[in-house]
Image (cartoon, rainbow, N blue to C red):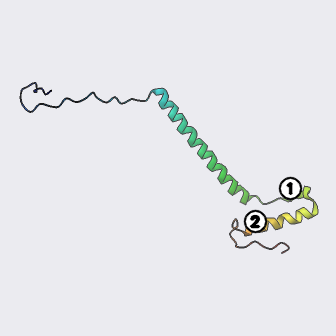
Amino acid sequence: MRTSSATGRGPARHARGPAKVIPLPTRRFVRRRRTLRLAIALAVAALASAVAARFFVAKAAPTQPQRLQHLGEPGSEVVPMADRAWHATSHGGRGTPAPFGV
């Protein structure tokens, strides 16, 4: 059914359906979403700092002789060789590992 405009001029318009209702988030939901984002950001920052500390502190602190006392004589000889082999591989970037006994 078409009706004429109120002024009587111009073509009649089509009747549109009801307007769309856009639901707005409540304050509680917005606060919860912000808190969740903050928690995720803090977790990512903590994880990144833990990874960075793991790599940088491990390189800065070599094995100390006091920590090797409980291993005895054979163990205290093996650990430095293992450390050299570990650093010679991809971790240290010097190519192939050094053979034991060198």
| Residue toward you, 3 or 78 | 3
Identify the residue at image location x=86%, y=65%. Answer: 78
Residue identifier under label 1:
67
Contact between labelled residues 2 and 1, with CB atoms less than 8 Å apart? no
Rendering coords of residue 6 (x, y %): 10, 24
Crowd band around label 1 with a 10 angstrom C-alpha radius: few (<14), some (14–19), many (20+)? few
Q: How many marks?
A: 2
Q: Which mark is residue 86?
A: 2
| Residue toward you, 79 or 24 | 24
Say what secondary structure mark 1 lies in: helix
Q: Residue furthest top?
A: 6
Q: Residue furthest front?
A: 1
Rendering coords of residue 96 (x, y %): 73, 73
Q: Earlier in the sequence, mark 1 or mark 2?
A: 1
Q: Find residue 82 and report its image quarter.
A: bottom right
> Is 90 located above or below residue 30 in the figure?
below
> Is 35 located above or below residue 67 in the figure?
above
Q: Is residue 54 left or right of residue 17?
A: right
| Residue toward you, 7 or 67 | 7
Q: Amino acid at mark 1?
A: Arg
Q: Find residue 54 and report its image quarter.
A: bottom right
